[in-house]
Image (cartoon, helix red, strand yellow):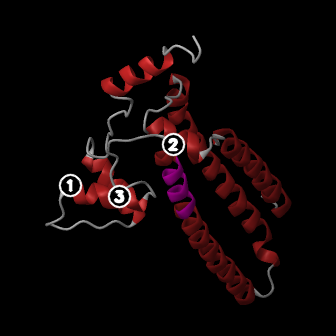
Amino acid sequence: MDSAELAVIGLTCNLVGVFFLANSIIFRRTRRVIEEFFAVDAGSIGSIRDYSLNKIQVVIGFLFLNTGFLLQGFAVLDKLGERIATVLVCLGIVAIAGLVYLIGATYSRRNFRRHLREFFGRHPWDFRKDMALTREIGGLLGVRHGAETTVEDYVRRVRVALGLPAEVEKQPIKGPTLGERGRRLRDDFQPLPGR
């Protein structure tokens, strides 16, 4: 095959791959995903059904995209004059991509922690109910537990890491006592002065 033909086939593969990747992207906010996970506002069954299809589309998209790029590379391979310099530039690009990935992963973890704090600030949650999940949340927030750590202590530390009060105690509803209500009623029904 001619190099021009390889380049056109590669570009066509790229277009197909980009289509599959773009089609698989679910535009969901992190806040919504957290709410669905904790069953505060469950999503529809359609989103569950489409999950497998989206995964398959991602794999297909990457296969087509990578095939297209390889075909384009083979199309111009014979035209390279300085192969060593080109290889060094490509390695530099890979190193920069790795650095950008690390920065993105760090930002993503911080953003996810912020959304967790926001979620638990809006929705009361019993952390004792599912200690495996509580340990997972604690791990994301950097809360360590040892052999001598009690459940109450660990839950308290996770709540503090989330920016919540250490413990939510149910306070009795304070209202007027029976004697105070009687006195108030008596005062309300006193005859007006001069009558």
Q: Earlier in the sequence, mark 3 or mark 1?
A: 1
Magenta residues (range):
110-118
Q: Is residue 150 left or right of residue 10?
A: left
Picture residue at 36% right of the left edge, 33% below the top: 173
Overall secondary structure of the magenta section: helix
Give x and y (percent) for residue 185: 43, 18
Out of 16 and 158, give the one closest to the viewer.
158
- Residue topped by disc 3: 158
For residue 46: magenta? no
Q: Is residue 44 above or below residue 113?
A: above
- Residue topped by disc 2: 122
Mark 2 touching mark 3, by CB under 8 A?
no
Q: Quadrant of the N terminus?
A: bottom right
| Distance between mark 1 and mark 2 Cα atoms | 23 Å
Q: Amino acid at mark 2?
A: Arg
Q: Is residue 18 left or right of residue 191?
A: right
- Residue topped by disc 1: 151
Q: Is residue 111 left or right of residue 138?
A: right
The local secondary structure at tag 1 comes to: helix
As drawn, the residue found furthest toward the top would be 195
Q: Is residue 65 above or below residue 161?
A: above
Q: Quadrant of the C terminus?
A: top right
